Amino acid sequence: SQLVHHSDRGVQYRAVRYTERLAQAEAVASVGSKGDSYDNAMSEALNSLFKAELIRNRGPWFGIDDLEIAVAEYFDWFNQRRLHGELGHIPPIEAETNFYTHQPAITQMKRA
């Protein structure tokens, strides 16, 4: 599958260096519908949580190394242990495991 970069219709798509970098990464540009804030709703919600739960609550940051370690720890916690109300107060990893546990087995087609 190909890398897709999704964004709103911001000015970055008019920047030559930006589109050149997408081409170098062999990424397909994807933009949301004009005036449709719901296209980016999940991303905006995650960004808001990230800023509130990590950046504002755990700072100040004394260097990029501190921040990089904190980001890795945050997303480990977010995915493995944070209880999400939208998922029935379980962590995402548990919701994903439950989802795949209850999927019918995929049968492989016989090769000719």
Image (cartoon, rainbow, N blue to C red):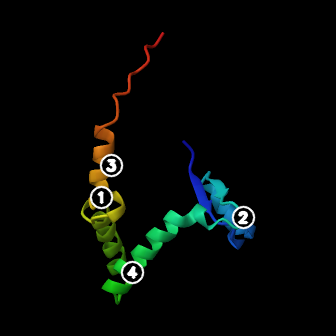
Pointer 1 with pointer 2, Cβ within 8 A? no
**Residue 34 disc label:** 2
**Nearest to the observer: residue 33 or residue 4:** 33
Work out whether 102 lies above or below 81.
above
Distance Cα–Cα, label 4 vs label 3? 25 Å
Q: Quadrant of residue 100?
A: top left
SS class, disc 4: helix
SS class, disc 2: loop
**Residue 96 disc label:** 3
Dot 4 or dot 3, earlier in sequence: 4
Pointer 4 with pointer 3, Cβ within 8 A? no
Q: Is residue 48 left or right of residue 9?
A: left
> Is residue 32 among the parts visible in the rendering?
yes
Distance Cα–Cα, label 4 vs label 1? 22 Å
**Residue 54 disc label:** none
> What residue sits right under mark 1 in the picture?
88
Q: Nearer the viewer, mark 1 or mark 2?
A: 1
Distance Cα–Cα, label 3 vs label 2? 32 Å
**Residue at the image point whose x is 39% and y is 80% from the top:** 52
> What residue sits right under mark 4 in the picture?
52
Dot 3 or dot 2, earlier in sequence: 2
Q: Is residue 80 left or right of residue 67?
A: left
Distance Cα–Cα, label 2 vs label 4? 28 Å
**Residue at the image point whose x is 31% and y is 84% from the top:** 58
The amino acid type, in three-letter code, at marker 4 is Ala
Dot 3 or dot 1, earlier in sequence: 1
